[in-house]
Structures are given as C-alpha cells and as structure tokens.
Image (cartoon, rainbow, N blue to C red):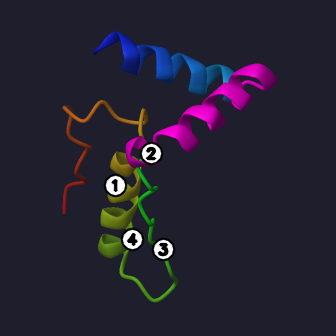
C-alpha cells in the first residue's frame, strides 16, 4: 500500500476515534481532493417478502461490501441445501 494511502487510512482511523484535529485535517483533504473520495455503495435491506435464500445472499453481499469485514479473498460459507 502506498505511504500516502496508509497516512490517509491512519488519519481516518484517528478521526473515527474522536480526534478533533484528525477530523479537521481529513475534512480539509476531502474538500481539496473530492475526486479521491469514493461515494458509499447503496446497501439494500432484507425485507419480509424475501425468501431465506435471497435474504442470505443479500446478507453475504452486504458483508463483502463493508470494508474490513471480510478480506475479499475468502469465500463466505455456503449452507448445504
């Protein structure tokens, strides 16, 4: 990972932990380089009219969309039918 990316990641971590200066600096960077900010992916919600298979597939999709929950390499466990 490039050093600048590591720096930004650490700054974001500090900002999320409540560091006011880190939050200010992160907002300044985001305003200076808006093209570098990736918009969040819209997550669909599980509804009562979904089949258990659809709900499980959507849950797995959501887990893989949330950064840091899975490593992106491993597969989620598939339940036997």
Sequence-first tag of 2 and 3: 2
**On the image, numbered disc 2 is attached to which residue?**
37
**On the image, numbered disc 4 is attached to which residue?**
55
Asked whether residue 43 is drawn in magenta, I would say no
**Residue 40 visible at all:** yes
Determine crowd level at label 3: few under 14, some 14-19, many 20+ residues with C-alpha closer than 10 A: some
> Gap between marks 4 and 3, in whole Å?
6 Å
Residue 18, position as x, y percentages in the image: 79, 26
**On the image, numbered disc 3 is attached to which residue?**
46
> Gap between marks 4 and 1, in whole Å?
9 Å
Residue 76, position as x, y percentages in the image: 26, 43
Depth check: 32 or 42 in front? 32
CB contact under 8 Å: marks 2 and 1 = no
**On the image, numbered disc 1 is attached to which residue?**
60
Sequence-first tag of 4 and 3: 3
Magenta region: 16-36
């Amino acid at each position: 990972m490039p050093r600048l990316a590591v720096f930004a990641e650490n700054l974001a971590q500090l900002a999320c932990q409540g560091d006011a200066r880190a939050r200010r600096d992160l907002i300044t960077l985001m305003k200076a380089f808006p093209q570098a900010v990736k918009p969040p992916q819209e997550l669909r919600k599980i509804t009562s009219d979904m089949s258990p298979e659809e709900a499980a597939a959507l849950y797995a999709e959501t887990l893989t969309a949330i950064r840091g929950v899975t490593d992106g390499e491993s597969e989620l466990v598939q339940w036997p039918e």
